[in-house]
Image: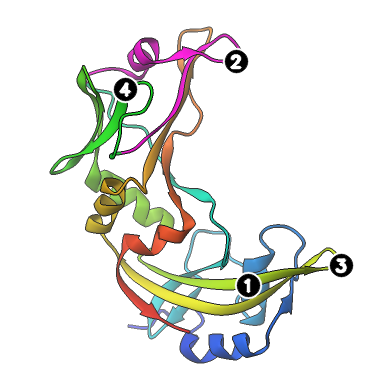
Amino acid sequence: MPNATLKEIDIKKVLPEISKKGFIKSLRKDNTGIGYTLETVMDIKENNLGEPDLSYKGIPVEMKAQRKHASSNITLITKSPHWSPVTAKGIIEKYGYKDTQGRQGLKVTLKVTEFNTQGLKLEVTNGNLNIVHKKDGVICYFVIDELMEKLKTKLFENLLLVFADTKVIDGVEWFHYNDSILLTELSNDGFKRLLNEGLMVWEFRMHIKESGSVRDHGAGFRLNKRHIDQLYAKKEKIM
């Protein structure tokens, strides 16, 4: 059933028409100009409420615009593991080091494909994502279904990615929106595959405060923007 609260847009018609316009001057100076400009051209109201942007064939769709050659990592979700059998403080005390401020801390990147310098890595099992030490074994873990539930609240089930070439004229950025893909059905298998290939990483960012408690700086899962499409089961080329 169509979502009456969202504007229905035939993206297969509208986006090619926008592409034919060539480069469009950014309507906002900061980094969000690429998305704001596209929304404005498509007559979509800016939405900062974590809700979908439009409806396509009756399904709610979140739209993200990206610079075509950007290759930065983004944080998909921030989430701490189940601290068992070792607590967060115990892990920092045993595997951490003194940071630049003299505090015992641990700020490292973990992936499935290899152990890091602290001897830590990720390990995918049937239903869990374990954090393991090469000598001590499993020290804490995530439940993959819990990770997927949080991911769904962050990324949406249906995601329209619109890519643009960019150029700067007199200090102002211009965008040529000329490539797009519709992604549907967030996939557990896609999530596990990205982990197993070492493309999805988890960053441990914590230290022990003077009080003895642990400060979490936003430990989370990070992925290069270029690989977001692999999180979805279905892909449809729009233009």
Q: Is residue 105 left or right of residue 93?
A: right
Q: Identify the residue under disc 4.
A: 119
Of 55 and 102, the residue lying toward us: 102
Q: Which residues are magenta?
A: 85-111
Q: Secondary structure at mark 3?
A: loop
Q: CA distance from mark 2 to mark 1?
A: 40 Å
Q: Is residue 5 visible?
A: no
Spatial CA distance of label 2 from label 3 is: 41 Å
N-terminal of the pair, mark 1 or mark 3, is: 1
Q: Secondary structure at mark 1?
A: strand
Could you say which disc has been placed on residue 165 in the image? 1
Amino acid found under the numbered disc labelled 2? Thr
In the rendered image, the vertical position of residue 217 relative to residue 178, given as above or below: above
Q: Amino acid at mark 1?
A: Asp
Give the alpha-carbon distance from disc 4 to disc 2, as whole Å.
21 Å
Q: Nearer the viewer, residue 226 or 186?
A: 226
- The percent coordinates of residue 103 (x first, y second) are 53, 11
Local crowd at mark 3 within 10 Å, few (<14), some, or many (≥20)?
Answer: few
Spot occupied by residue 219 in the image (x, y as percentages of width and height): 44, 33
Residue drawn at point x = 63 percent, y = 75 percent: 38
- In three-dimensional space, the C-alpha distance between marks 4 and 3, rounded to whole angstroms, equals 50 Å
* Residue type (three-letter) at the residue carrying disc 4: Gly
